[in-house]
């Protein structure tokens, strides 16, 4: 996880290279819109790679969504995971901070050999990846941040995070 100073330094460096982003941010704020540069999301991906949670992380623009992919270790099973993520709705007020996401083209592929239960499910095709929200909804030990999950839609309420 980057320190606040590293984040500020990265932001300062980005704005020096891309001063037009300040004007775009002001125009967006006047229109009550919020945009995040793709470079900022890629920087967050690099921070996740540095932490060791994900390897070979990629973010590509697929308007109006983002294609995310990376190598992860899921229950001692090396997996290449990818999906197109659409941000459908963001609510930010005193009571809630919710983000509604829609996932399309979810793919899981084994990176190497494994005999874990997850590997068996992926090899057999038993996981229904067309409805990732429904799949997440039935997982044990769900995070309290997960407000709703159904079909290909997942709603996160970040105010529920006890941290």
Image (cartoon, rainbow, N blue to C red):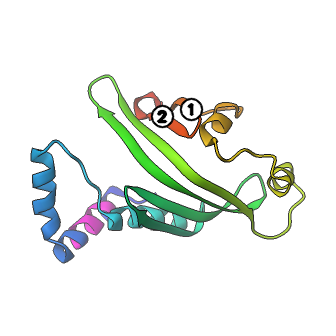
Q: Which residue is drawn at the image coordinates 32% and 33% (left, top)?
A: 91
Query: 62 left or right of 105?
Result: left
Q: Which residue is mark 1?
A: 149
Give SS at disc 2.
strand
Q: Position of residue 40 (x, y in %)?
A: 34, 63
Q: Position of residue 87 (x, y in %)?
A: 40, 46
Query: 43 left or right of 142?
Result: left
Q: Which residue is drawn at the image coordinates 20% and 45% (left, top)?
A: 33
Vertical side of 14 occupied by 142: above or below? above
Query: 112 left or right of 100?
Result: right
Q: Residue furthest top?
A: 95
Q: Position of residue 128 (x, y in %)?
A: 72, 44
Q: Residue furthest bottom?
A: 17
Vertical side of 20 occupied by 77: above or below? above
Circle count:
2
Query: 125 left or right of 34?
Result: right
Q: Is residue 16 magenta?
A: no
Query: Overall secondary structure of the magenta stretch?
Result: helix
Depth check, front residue: 92 or 31: 31
Q: Which residues are magenta?
A: 7-13
Q: Using a 10 Å C-alpha cutoff, classify the residue at mark 1 as few (fewer than 14 neighbours), some (14 to 19) or many (20 or more).
A: many
Answer yes or no: is residue 51 visible: no
Q: Which residue is mark 2?
A: 155
Q: Is residue 12 magenta?
A: yes
Vertical side of 2 occupied by 58: above or below? below
Vertical side of 19 occupied by 124: above or below? above
Q: Position of residue 75 (x, y in %)?
A: 76, 51
Q: Using a 10 Å C-alpha cutoff, classify the residue at mark 2 as few (fewer than 14 neighbours), some (14 to 19) or many (20 or more).
A: many
Q: Which residue is drawn at the image coordinates 34% and 38% (left, top)?
A: 90
Q: Are marks 1 and 2 in contact (CB under 8 Å)?
A: yes
């Amino acid at each position: 996880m980057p320190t606040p100073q590293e984040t500020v330094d990265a932001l300062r460096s980005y704005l020096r290279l891309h001063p037009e982003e300040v004007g775009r941010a002001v125009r967006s704020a006047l229109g009550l819109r919020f945009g995040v540069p793709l470079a900022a999301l890629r920087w967050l991906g690099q921070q996740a790679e540095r932490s060791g949670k994900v390897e070979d992380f990629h973010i590509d623009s697929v308007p109006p969504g983002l294609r995310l992919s990376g190598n992860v270790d899921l229950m001692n099973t090396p997996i290449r995971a990818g999906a197109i993520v659409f941000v459908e709705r963001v609510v930010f007020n005193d009571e809630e901070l919710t983000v509604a996401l829609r996932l399309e083209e979810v793919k899981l592929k084994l990176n190497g050999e494994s005999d874990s239960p997850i590997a068996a499910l992926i090899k057999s095709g038993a996981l229904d990846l067309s409805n990732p929200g429904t799949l997440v909804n039935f997982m044990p030990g769900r995070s309290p941040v997960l407000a709703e999950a159904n079909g290909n839609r997942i709603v996160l309420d970040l105010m529920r995070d006890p941290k």
